[in-house]
Amino acid sequence: MTIAPIFSPPTDQEIEARRDKVRMLMEERGIDVYVAANPDNVFYLTNFANYVHERPFILVMERTGTPRFVVPKLEIPHVETRRVGALDLIEYREFPAPDGERWIDSFVPLFPSGATVGVESVCPLQIYDAIPGTRRCSDIVDDARMVKTPYEKGRIAYSCELVTDAHAQLLDIAKPGATGAEVSAALTSGMSRRLLSDTPTANLLATSMFAFFQPPTVSHDPHNFTDIYMQMVEGGPHVSVINCRLNGYGAEIERTFFLGSVPEAARKPFEVMMEARHLALELTKPGAVMGEVDAKVNAVFHRAGYSDNLLHRTSHSIGVTGHEAPFLAEGYDRVIEPGMFYTIEPGVYLPGVGGFRQSDTVMTTENGNAVLTTGPESLDELTLPIS
């Protein structure tokens, strides 16, 4: 399946359709008012992104009417520049501020008497404590974000193009002695140039790029990036990692690769990882239960004797971030729907040998899935010659 890449901002209609989805869930769950302070949820509903420090930014939505956005006065021009869709701005003076001019003084009067208020599970305690009425924890916006709109699919497809091209560059420059610093600089600068060429007004506050690799000495520890000068070596397994949020939409691609030769101890775990990967791609389709997919994929590793070498679930999702719900994870029993995105990345990790993981960004279709990032997959293709 081919999805046309999109890099233009959302329209008012796109943002309003997302809000309507949230309002529908509010009605289904008996919630009168919803409070969103998570910056990713605020971005999803307004197109406004910012680093949130001590000054709160709080979106308040009722089932009808224009959402109200409580923001510090100094940020009003910034919000007006970036926001999409109707939005009533409720300003406060500063943080801290005198009584009567604090954020809480602008926030509390927004709630009708006796309202049932939906609150994110990650809501900061100071905001939670200030909410009047009956508070109910419900991650409505996170749930609304799980199934992507056609516009979002195009935005993610664009991010997938950029990370796919960056990963091809990584494999082109891979050689013994190449450092993490060199690789990261080359890849992120290339993605930045392409992004800003296509979208000169791209929001850098909604952009992050992580492009790196792990050599075999640390690839068994999947989040060990403690030394930017770690070097590629002959053999492997090396694991490449490109996980990005580009102007508000994520994508991911990873591969296990070798330089010159494949150590004998790496052949079996690579083959088992690929067996698990192929099964995950086969099972990730609408109607499947997410936790059951992960359990079946994990069974491949159990049968191979790698039960003690599993460190993570089969997948997380991609959207307005590079890492979010839903998850292909045991104990997470939601049902897969068309229009969801997953990073298919079962992995196995053996100290003294290395890590084995390949990840692609995958979208579920009406009866299966489509892989939106591309790269070499087989052991032969991923054994790179040394010049």
Image: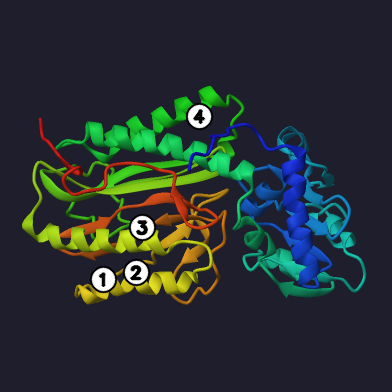
Amino acid type of the residue that numbered disc 1 sits on in the rendered structure:
Phe
Secondary element under disc 1, as helix, strand or loop, is helix
Picture disc at residue 372: none
User: Where does label 3 land, which residue?
Assistant: 345
Tell me which numbered mark, 3 or 2, is placed earlier along the sequence. 2
User: Where does label 2 land, which residue?
Assistant: 297
The answer to whether marks 2 and 1 mark residues whose Cβ atoms lie closer than 8 Å is: yes
Picture disc at residue 195: 4
- Residue at 36% over, 73% down: 296
The answer to whether marks 4 and 2 mark residues whose Cβ atoms lie closer than 8 Å is: no
Secondary element under disc 2, as helix, strand or loop, is helix
Count neighbours of disc 3 (C-alpha within 10 A) and say few if under 14, some if 14 to 19, many if 20 or more: many
Task: Measure how far apart labels 2 and 1 are at the Cα level.
Answer: 7 Å
Of discs 4 and 2, which sits in the foreground?
2
Task: Measure how far apart labels 4 and 1 are at the Cα level.
Answer: 39 Å
Horizontal side of 272 relative to 88 (left or right) equals left
Residue 216 location in percent, x, y? 17, 53
